[in-house]
Amino acid sequence: MELVNNKYVMSGGIDPLELCKTYGTPLYVYDASVIERQYKRLAGAFDYPKFKIHYACKALTNLNVMRLLRQLGAGADCVSVQEVQLSLMAGYKPDDIIYTPNFASVEEFGEAVKLGVRINIDAIPMLENWGLQHKDVPVCLRINPHLMAGGNEKISVGHIDSKFGISIHQLPHVLRVVENQGLRVEGLHMHTGSDILDVDIFLRGADILFEAARKFPDLQYIDLGSGFKVPYKPDDIETDVEELGEKLSARFAEFCKEYGRELELIVEPGKFLVSESGYLFARCSLVKQTTSTTFIGLDTGLNHLIRPMFYGSYHKIVNVTEPTFKPRIYTVVGNICETDTFGSDRRIAEAVEGDIIGFYNAGAYGWMMASNYNSRFRPAEVLIYKGKAHLIRKRETIEDLVRNQVAVEGL
Ligand SMILES: *Cc1c(COP(=O)(O)O)cnc(C)c1O
């Protein structure tokens, strides 16, 4: 969304104010052309021929978005069996789906096996079970190389006391289990969490995996996870995917030569593909001056966009209705009965009741983390595709809030 002649416009010249009028607020809007741009940018950065992007669909599982990414050539990375089911509904082939759960039950693994997808195991006890039940089903192993990729401690998963993955230091134990049970290891995986700012640290993680790979003769692929950072502010550092692609392609080709076979190289970004495509629009319900600050209060809250309160993420916030008014300093808050702050001390064009306020970078982990807290409806979703706006999810209704409730007789 850009300012053109003092008005915000979205791709295809679409007016966000019109969308809010048509579909109401709060409203999530995604721009398919941005998703395509990001996919092609990443795909273009790697010249290794057997390179594949798996979309980490937990970022945004609307089937339309998943189909768009499949059409662009992506596979899917799923952290639950429900995401596997959604991926299949979106037309992904089982072989293009990797199931990468954390502390999933033996039963859930069993369901994923039935669906025929690639299986990623991230704990030794699960690996020990594997031989008893699914001896013939090959597995991928999630290795924790213990890198601090940087960024936020809530989303960083590669550190020493992380619950994710099998420690690289436990490799000898893993090898004993694999041999003992006669398992076939077809993939190695790492995902060090979010916010890779330093390409060389990522490459060091890759090297640790390549080193481990020598011990597994049946590998088909190596999956290096994600953590590709996108900018939230104009001067933000982002992952230099071009540098990463160039260095990693070269390094991977070298590794394959040593290994003796050309393996598939996989990465699995979520945020990188969809974050910048998304906006949340909400209506200012009230402007309230207190002794310390001026609040813009909205018709949405942490129930619809929890990232700022959950892990302190920054979302650029603008007044879409009156972009040219003189900026004032505001604290932007939601309507939930908790402290519910989207941004403090933000310079935003002077706002009044009824103005539409827009949040940037709301494509990833926005709607997906939305809840019905305070018994409000989750927002509608719109996708701008080929220059036209399409409603891709209706706003909820009161029926949705009670759909699965069961009345007790006498109450
Ligand atoms: C969440 C997740 C990703 C995607 O992370 P982003 O920061 O959104 O790119 C990739 N792989 C796994 C295993 C994940 O859990």
Image (tube, rainbow, N blue to C red):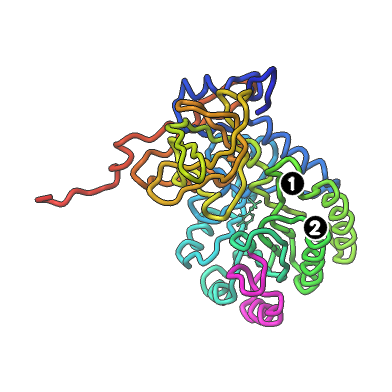
Q: State how many labels appear.
A: 2
The image quadrant of residue 189 is: bottom right
> Which quadrant contains ligand 1?
bottom right
Apparent side of residue 312 relative to residue 407 in the rendered image (left or right): right
Estimate the x, y position of residue 171 in percent, counting from the top left.
70, 78
The circle drawn on residue 198 is 2
Q: Is residue 152 above or below residue 401?
A: below
The image quadrant of residue 168 is: bottom right
Residue toward you, 156 or 77: 156
Label 1 SS:
loop
Q: Is residue 126 visible?
A: yes
Disc 1 to disc 2, C-alpha distance: 13 Å
Q: Residue at x 52, y 57 (%)?
A: 112
Q: Is residue 88 visible?
A: no
Between label 1 and label 2, give the one nearer the viewer. 1
Crowd class of label 2 (few under 14; some 14 to 19; many from 20; radius 10 Å):
some
The circle drawn on residue 236 is 1
Range drawn in magenta: 157-184
Estimate the x, y position of residue 2 in percent, counting from the top left.
68, 26
Amino acid type for the residue under numbered disc 2:
Asp
Q: Which residue, as the protein is rendered here, is positioned at the far front?
A: 291
Apparent side of residue 242 relative to residue 167 in the rendered image (left or right): right
The answer to whether marks 1 and 2 mark residues whose Cβ atoms lie closer than 8 Å is no
Residue toward you, 308 or 227: 308
Estimate the x, y position of residue 131 in percent, counting from the top left.
57, 74
Tell me which label, 1 or 2, sits earlier in the chain. Answer: 2
Q: Residue at x 46, y 42 (%)?
A: 290
371 is within the stretch colored magenta: no
Q: Determine whether the beta carbon of the residue marked 1 sits less than 8 angstroms from the nearest atom of ligand 1.
A: no
Q: Is residue 145 above or below residue 231?
A: below
Q: Residue at x 60, y 40 (%)?
A: 346
